[in-house]
Amino acid sequence: MIKVKRFEFSANCYVVSDDTGECVIIDPCAHYRRYRENFKHYISKEQLKPVRCLLTHGHYDHLLSCDQVRAEYGLYPEIHQGDKPWMAKVEQTIEEVFGEGNFHYDIVKPQRFLDDGEIIKFGNHELKVIHTPGHSPGSVVFYCEEEKVAFTGDTLFRCDIGRSDLMFGWEVDLMQSLKMLTQLLPDDCVIWPGHDLESTMGYEKKNNRFLNFG
């Protein structure tokens, strides 16, 4: 059985582990020192071994502490190749948001890129990479079919969906991605989004107006 620990930083960061002690880190985004200390303390307290660092997409608020993960655990972030354009401009974006010279951490970029359908293994479990473009070209969902758990990034939220009006976003792609998820994920699949609290696919089908495909 997997254990999901959610940290609410600039976005939701997840540490996903099982009884082997291995874990994956999804969207490390601790932008304050105390957040970073809390994150490190949890992994140490639980005696976890991080084996992969995964990004649901390339927006700056989901990757602000990749440098910590690299320094502490030797892991580079991995992201779908569709978000190479975002990674190419992430320093510029952070400077625009925080102000020149006000962000005091390094930006660590991917050494490799994920493919649709790729399997991420940790401990006794697997996460499948599901490409869900729309919010960004390289947005993905990480899905554990065995446990019926999905990490949806900014594609699907509780009673909401991600924006498609940002640079490189496209509404048509986003709606196609959402329709595909409603067909792929079972109603009892737990949804862990990039912001806000968890939900289930069944709840979203009934209550999320954006999933009414008629």
Image: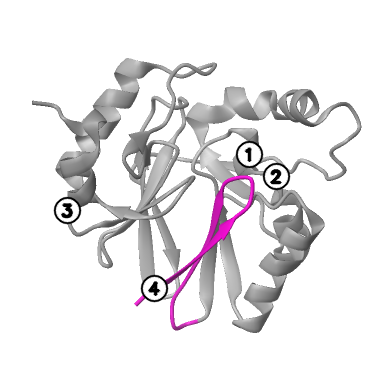
Label 1, on which residue? Answer: 61
Model colouring? one colour
Residue farthest along the right direction in this orientation: 101
In the image, taking residue 38 as reference, residue 171 lies left or right, namely left
> Disc 4 versus disc 1: distance between alpha carbons?
25 Å
Q: Quadrant of the N terminus?
A: bottom left
Label 2, on which residue? Answer: 64
Magenta stretch encompasses residue 134: no
Q: Nearer the viewer, mark 4 or mark 1?
A: 1
> Disc 3 versus disc 4: distance between alpha carbons?
18 Å
Q: What mark, if any, has residue 2 been given in the picture?
A: 4
Q: Find the magenta span and give its range.
A: 1-20
Q: Amino acid at mark 4?
A: Ile
Q: Secondary structure at mark 3?
A: loop
Q: Quadrant of residue 146?
A: bottom left
Q: Secondary structure at mark 2?
A: loop
Label 3, on which residue? Answer: 186
- Specify few, some or many for label 4: CA neighbours under 10 Å numbering under 14, 14-19, or 20 or more: some
Tell me what residue is drawn at x 49 percent, y 43 percent. 56
Query: Are discs 2 and 1 less than 8 Å apart at CB?
Result: yes
Q: Amino acid at mark 2?
A: Leu
Above or below, comparing residue 145 to residue 182 in the picture: below
Q: Of residues 160 and 93, which is closer to you in this image?
A: 160
- Specify few, some or many for label 1: CA neighbours under 10 Å numbering under 14, 14-19, or 20 or more: many
Horizontal and vertical percent position of residue 13:
56, 55
Above or below, comparing residue 13 to residue 104 in the picture: below
